[in-house]
Image (tube, rainbow, N blue to C red):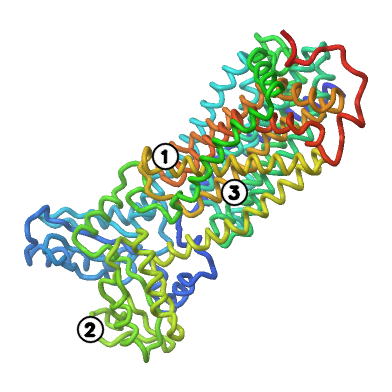
Amino acid sequence: MRWLVPALLVLAWLAVGGGLGPFAGKLTEVSTNDQAAFLPQSAESTRVLEVQETFRQGATQPVIVVWTSGGAEITTGQNTAATRALAALRGTPGVVGAPTPAFSSDDHLALRGVVQLSPDLSGGGLGDILDRIGAAVPVEGLKAQLAGPAATRADLSDAFAGIDGVLLGVALITVLVILLAVYRSVLLPLIIIIGAVFALGLACAVVYFLADRDIVRVDGQVQGILFILVIGAATDYALLLTARFREELATGADRFAAGRVALRRSLAPIVASAATVALGLLALLLSSLTNNRALGPVGAIGIACAALSALTFLPAALILLGRAALWPARPRPSGAGAHGLWNRVARLVDRRPRLVWIATLLPLAALALFAPQLNAKGVPLEETFVNDAPSVAAQAALSEHFPGGSGQPAVIVAPAAEATRITERARAVPGVFDAAAVTGSGRPGDAPKVVGGRVLVQATLRDEPDSDAAQDTVERLRAALRTEDDVLVGGYSAQRYDTTETARKDTLLIVPVVLAIILLILIALLRSLMMPVLLVATVALNFLAVLGVSALIFPSLLGFTGSDASVPLYGFVFLVALGVDYNIFLMSRVREETVRHGAREGMLRGLVTTGGVITSAGVVLAATFAALVVIPLAFLVQIAFIVAFGVLLDTLVVRSLLVPALVGDLGGRAWWPSRPGRDHVAPPSREPSPARRR
C-alpha cells in the first residue's frame, strides 16, 4: 500500500493533466472583453443604458471614422466621397442602421462619421467588420482611421491574443530557471512545474465549465491573473513541502517516513495559506463591479487546485522517486545552503531586536505616507496600451480637430416636456461643448424622439471622454440637473465615473472584510491573539508602502499618469493575502520550534530553517507576477509591479527582519494568550541553536 497509493495518485494526476490540460487554451472561447458588461448594476449610467434600450439606441457599439488631410483644407468633393463611403456600409453584416454623414471640423482639416455596430460582435468577428470598414472608407488625399469603443475593444482583443501561450510560456520558463538555480537538481524542478501545470489544467477546466454556463464571467485580465496565480501558488506550496521532505531525508529517514512527516508538517500551513488567499479573493463577491466579482470565484478555484496538487501529486511523486528526486544534489536541512546568511540575520535580530524593527519600520512608514498620492481615477486611453494601438492614434487625431467628447457624448435622459430647458442648462455647464436632443429623423433640428414621455439629450464634452476632466464635467452635469425630476446622466464618461466611484466604495467595504478573514485564520492556526494582529499589521504596512512607491514610480519612471480604480483593491487582496502566506510559513515553523525550545530560541531556529525556502518562494511568486508585463496593458503592468515589488519587499524585509525583530523584542508575550514555549516544552535539545553556531 505504501507504493500503491502514491502510484495511483500520480496516475490520476497524469490523467487529469492529459484530459484537462487543453482547457487552458480554450478559456478564450468563453471570455469577453466587453467592458460595458462589467458596469455596476445600480449606477446611474447603467440606468441610462436601460432607457436607451427603449429608444433602440443602447444595443450598439460605435466606431468613429476620422479622416485627416495632413494640413490641407478638405474639399467638398472629399466630404461627399466620405459620406458616400459611410452610406455604402448600410446593410453590411454587423452594421446597425445607417451611419451618420461625414461631418467637417471647424478648421476644415478633418472629417468624422459614426458607424453603429452590433453589440454581439467580439474577438475575430469584430476585427473582421472593422477591417471591412477600414477597406471601405479610404478617400483620396485623406488618411482614414478608426476610433471609438468598438476600435478600442478590438485592440483589447489583440492585446489578449495568445495569452494562453505567451504568458504561460514566459511564466513557466521563469519559474523553471529559478528552481534550477535554487535546487541544483534536474528532476525536482520538473516535478514542481508539472504539478503546477496539472493544477492549472484542472482549474481551467472547472472555470471553463462554469463560464460556459454563465455561472462565472471571464475576461482577458481574469484569465491572465488565473494563470499567474495558479503557477505561483502551486510553486510556493511545493517549495514548502519539498523543503520539509529534503530536511527529513537529511536526518536519515527513508522516503516513506520523510513523505509522511513532510505532508503532516506542511498540511496546516499550506491549507491555511490557501484558505487565506481563496477567502480573500471570494471577498471580491461583495463588490458592485462585475469584473471584480468575476475574479473572486475564478481565483479561489485556481488556489484550491494549486493546493490540491501540492498536497497530493507532489508528495506522491517525491515518495516514488525518493532521493533520486534531488539528484545530483544531496538531501540537506532547510537553510543549510544559506547557512551563513540566515545565521547572520538571526544573530542580528537576536542581539538588537528593537533597533532592527525600528530601522525597518520607519522607512516603510515613510513610504506609506505617499500612498494617498496614487491617482486611481482611471487610465487615459493613450496610456491604456503599453505599445502603440491604432485606436489610440485615431482618438488622438479626432481630439486634435474635434471636441474631445466627439462621438462619445454624455447622454441625458429627460422628461419630454422639459427637453428644451434641460438642453439649455446642459449647454451652460462648464466643460460641455454643445447639447442637442436626439431627433426621430436623425437630422439635427427636427422634432425630438419621444419614448414613454422621455427624450435623450446628447451633450458633447470638450475633453476626451476617458480623461479626468470629462469625469469632472459629468459630476458638474449631474449636480446642475439633480434638482430636475427623472433626469439621469449617462454615457461613456459617466460610466467611467461610476466605475471609479463604485471601486472606491468597494475598497472601503472589502478591505476590512479581507483583514477580518485573515485575522480569524491566523488565530485558528497560531492559537494566539497577539501574533495574528502583529502579522496583519505588518503586511498592511507593507501594502501601503508599496502603494507609496507606486505613486512615485508610475508617473516618473513608467509614464503612467493614473491607475485603474480597481488597482489598489487588487493589489491589497494579492499583497495582503500572499504576504500573510510567508508569515504563515514562518510562524507555523516558529511555533513548532517554540514548543520545543522556548520563544526566543524558537524564533531564531524558525528564521534560519525557513529563510532559504521562503525567500525562494517569494522570488518565484514575484517573477511569475512580473510575467504579466508581456500583456501590453497598463492595468496588468501596474498589477505586476505592485505584486512583484510588494512580495519581494515583504519577503526580504518584513518577513526576514521586521516580524522576527518584533517577536524577539516581545518574547513570549507575542504568543498571548497562549504560551507554547512555556507550557509545552519538550526535553531540551543538546543541539545548539543554528544562530549561535560559529
Q: Which mark is residue 208?
A: 3
| Callout 2: SS | loop
Name above or below for residue 501 compared with residue 565.
below
Q: Is residue 286 left or right of residue 623?
A: right
Residue mark closest to the camera, 3 vs 1: 1
Residue 94 x, y percent position in the rendering: 35, 63
| Callout 1: SS | helix
- Give 314 or 599, whichever is nearer the viewer: 599
Quarter that holds the N terminus: top right
Q: Which mark is residue 445?
A: 2
Task: Specify the quadrant of the image occupied by residue 654.
Answer: top right
- Identify which residue is drawn at 21% across, 63% down: 402
Q: Which mark is residue 553?
A: 1
Q: Is residue 456 left or right of residue 485?
A: left
Task: Specify the quadrant of the image occupied by residue 283.
Answer: bottom right
Residue 411 x, y percent position in the rendering: 37, 74
Q: Which mark is residue 458?
A: none
- For the residues labelled 2 and 3, the Cα–Cα distance comes to 51 Å
Residue mark closest to the camera, 2 vs 1: 1
Residue mark closest to the camera, 2 vs 3: 2
Residue 446 x, y percent position in the rendering: 24, 85
| Comes first in the chain, label 3 or label 1 | 3
- Identify which residue is drawn at 35% across, 68% down: 473
The amino acid beneath tag 1 is Ile
